[in-house]
Image: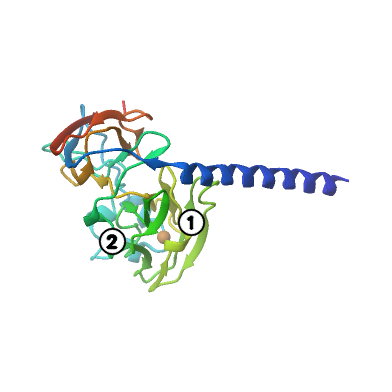
């Protein structure tokens, strides 16, 4: 009886997920091209307002781990031994690893500039010692044309170039990215391109051998995004101009940086700038 009940519940949950998934997919297909005129660039800077959080050094934690010789190998960089959640430039207070992207109004999508339709580069997330490098990645497997998905050619590879085993456990929006967990023996690599779908917020990547190892991965269906550099600056080129869009921002320490609706802005043909101040207080 209990088994029968749980099967019924499981079937109901599955049906619910299926319906939600279908409506999500249909919602995608219904989107229409946002009317725009010309293209502009969006450049800007994200700075920390106030005194930035103190650095969290991971060396003591690593010393206690069985893989300490790998984690603390002479070739391991400082960024692999310091928690990179808050990476704030001491002089300029620029915040690194903030994802900035442009969101078209609901039900619409932005035209992809001809220069941005093909993205042949292969993205790589490596685990050379006991950290994912880089911490923040954006993947764009396709763009929209006439409301349908067209492949950009971009792919993404996860590597373990360390001498110890890692794994990669991905957690995303269950309706879009149910997640996966892949073992990564030393000196192996896996192409995860086919495992990823777009979702509004990043997919979290985790290694369970080394609990401090984490990374964030955004998946977009348009090219209008940038990750802030070490000095907090970013640049998004060839943005469709003349229509109101939302400038979205996300940092792993605080979530949305411009609110969950973003900052409304009409991009004009030519240069546009945006300054963002963030704080976790
Ligand atoms: Cu690991």
Query: Which residue is located at x 51 percent, y 51 percent?
Result: 177
Q: Is residue 254 left or right of residue 183?
A: left
Labels 1 and 2: the sequence-earlier one:
2
For residue 261, what is the image quadrant? top left
Kindly identify which numbered label has been placed on residue 45. none
Image position of 183 with respect to 268: above or below: below
Query: Which residue is located at x 56 percent, y 42 percent?
Result: 23
Query: Which residue is located at x 26 percent, y 62 percent?
Result: 76
- Report x, y in % for residue 38: 19, 42
Measure how far apart labels 1 and 2 are at the Cα level.
26 Å
Q: Which residue is mark 1?
A: 169
Query: Which residue is located at x 39 percent, y 38 percent?
Result: 108
- Front label number (1 vs 2): 2
Image position of 147 with respect to 150: above or below: above
- Is residue 168 something one can see in this rendering? yes
Q: Is residue 88 left or right of residue 182?
A: left
- Report x, y in % for residue 122: 30, 65
The residue carrying mark 1 has its beta carbon less than 8 Å from ligand 1: no
Query: Which of the two residues, 152 or 76, is positioned nearer the viewer here?
Result: 152
The residue carrying mark 2 has its beta carbon less than 8 Å from ligand 1: no
Image position of 270 with respect to 261: above or below: below
- Is residue 254 something one can see in this rendering? no
Q: Is residue 2 left or right of residue 142?
A: right
- Report x, y in % for residue 14: 68, 47
Query: Which of the two residues, 256 or 242, is positioned nearer the viewer here?
Result: 242
Image position of 67 with respect to 226: above or below: below
Q: Which residue is mark 2?
A: 119
Classify mark 1: helix, strand or loop.
strand
Other residues around mark 1 within 10 Å, as few (<14) / some (14–19) / many (≥20): some
Quadrant position of the C terminus in the picture:
top left
Q: Are discs 1 and 2 less than 8 Å apart at CB?
A: no
């Amino acid at each position: 009886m209990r088994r029968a009940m749980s099967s019924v519940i499981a079937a109901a949950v599955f049906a619910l997920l299926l319906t939600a998934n279908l409506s999500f997919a249909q919602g995608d297909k219904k989107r229409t091209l946002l009317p725009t005129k010309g293209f502009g660039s969006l450049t800007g800077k994200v700075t920390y307002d106030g005194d930035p959080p103190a650095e969290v050094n991971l060396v003591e934690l690593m010393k206690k781990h069985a893989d300490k010789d790998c984690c603390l190998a002479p070739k391991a960089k400082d960024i692999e031994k310091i928690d990179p959640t808050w990476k704030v430039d001491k002089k300029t207070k620029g915040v690194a690893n903030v994802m900035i992207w442009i969101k078209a109004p609901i039900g619409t999508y932005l035209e992809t500039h001809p220069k941005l339709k093909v993205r042949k580069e292969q993205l790589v997330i490596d685990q050379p010692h006991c950290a994912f490098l880089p911490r923040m990645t954006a993947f764009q497997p396709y763009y929209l044309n006439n409301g349908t998905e067209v492949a950009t050619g971009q792919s993404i590879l996860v590597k373990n170039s360390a001498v110890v085993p890692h794994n990669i456990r991905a957690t995303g929006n269950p309706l879009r990215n149910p997640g996966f967990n892949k073992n990564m023996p030393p000196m192996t690599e896996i192409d995860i391109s086919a495992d990823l779908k777009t979702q509004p917020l990043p997919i979290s990547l985790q290694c369970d051998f080394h609990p401090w190892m984490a990374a964030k991965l955004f998946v977009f269906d348009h090219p209008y995004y940038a990750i802030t550099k070490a000095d907090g600056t970013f640049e998004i080129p060839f943005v469709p101009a003349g229509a109101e869009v939302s400038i979205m921002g996300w940092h792993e320490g605080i979530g949305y940086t411009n609110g969950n609706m973003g900052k409304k802005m009409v991009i004009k043909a030519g240069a546009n700038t945006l300054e963002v101040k963030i704080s976790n207080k």
